[in-house]
Image (spheres, grey):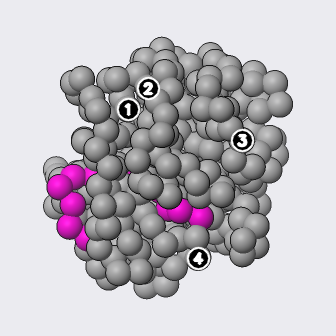
Amino acid sequence: MAGTAPFAYVANNRSHNVSVIDTATNTVVATVPVDGAPIGIAVTPDGKRVFIAIRAQAQNTGLVSVLDAANNTVVATESVTDFFIGGIAITPDGKQAYVACDDNPVSVIDTATNKVVATIPQRDSIDLAFSPDGKHAYVTDFNGVTVIDTTAQKVQTTIPIAKTQGTVGRGIAITSDGKQAYLTNGDTNNVSVIDTATNTVSATVVVGVDPVGVAVTPDGKRAYVANHGSNDVSVINTATNAPAATVGVGTAPVGVATAADGKNVYVANEDSGTVSVIDTATNTVAATVSVGDHPFAIGIIRPAPSWQSRPSG
């Protein structure tokens, strides 16, 4: 199995494994056990390795395991935190993985050695995404977003998000031109649109109940938001920041990822044990794939951005 083939990797939280989906056929072609409950997953730009953030079987321990995509075997595991681990993202150049660690610092892993090489102080962190040029990491937390300068590996600024109660700042995704970031706001049932030039909220979009995951299509025209509480996906037109469609999926959708060609969006339905495949041309579910117990996150190789012929992490 070649690492550059169109595979989606699904982190199954309760069955402690990763399902590998062939996106050409939308079938599971492998199931890989891991040492604990996977919570986040990211694929290197060359498609050769998959980094998996795991809440280990030992209580309050966070690990990152590295999967060789050529043969679907775990080739390395690194201890990252003694607390709960969160999301994971890989820099557009593929050289580093950044790991959110709840109320611990963000950990930086060298993808050549699979070792932690730096930590960046944070009050807490849930998920993260990189600007297309890799110069900034946008890290979600319980109050909004922290922007990290990845060259200096230090906090540049914070972006507060208004909330009523409960959790905000769950999932985040950035458009391919780097101009807008989309932040799901959990209990407030909306998405904040961040203008990355000013690092301020430029719009708020009402979506479904308890939005968690979000992904932007490679062309940057649509954002797909998984609404955990209403069992559907909201589609946002990024040009107008208005809702464009609502797609019913499985029960308790959480993770979202777009295929490299932008034709399909993959949604992990936590309570259904399935992945819904949305056809972006029609915004309808084209297939439903059974995976493991409580699928939580999805990773797919992304296309290279126009500014460098790059794949983004």
Question: What mark, if any, has residue 221 been given in the picture?
Answer: 3
Towards the viewer: 290 or 188: 188
- Residue 266 lies left or right of residue 135; in this view the side is right
**Element type at marker 4?**
loop
Q: Residues within 10 Å of mark 4 (few under 14, many from 20)?
A: some
Q: Is residue 96 above or below residue 139?
A: below
**Element type at marker 3?**
loop
- How far apart are labels 2 and 3 at the CA level? 19 Å
- How far apart are labels 1 and 3 at the CA level? 21 Å
- How far apart are labels 3 and 4 at the CA level? 23 Å
Q: What's the magenta bit mostly, secondary-structure-wise?
A: loop
Tags 1 and 3 touching, CB below 8 Å: no
Q: Kindly identify the amino acid type of the residue bearing the numbered disc 3.
A: Lys
Tags 2 and 1 touching, CB below 8 Å: yes
Disc number lying in front (3 or 4): 3
Question: What mark, if any, has residue 21 been given in the picture?
Answer: none
On whether residue 37 falls in the magenta region, the answer is no
- Tell me the magenta residue range: 120-132
Name which of mark 2 and mark 3 comes first in the sequence. Answer: 2
Query: Residue beneath label 4, please?
Result: 93
| Residue name at image x 21 percent, y 24 percent | 165
- Residue 258 lies left or right of residue 74; in this view the side is right
- How far apart are labels 2 and 1 at the CA level? 6 Å
The quadrant in which residue 114 appears is bottom left
Query: Residue beneath label 1, please?
Result: 185
- How far apart are labels 4 and 1 at the CA level? 29 Å
Tags 4 and 1 touching, CB below 8 Å: no
Query: Residue beneath label 2, please?
Result: 190
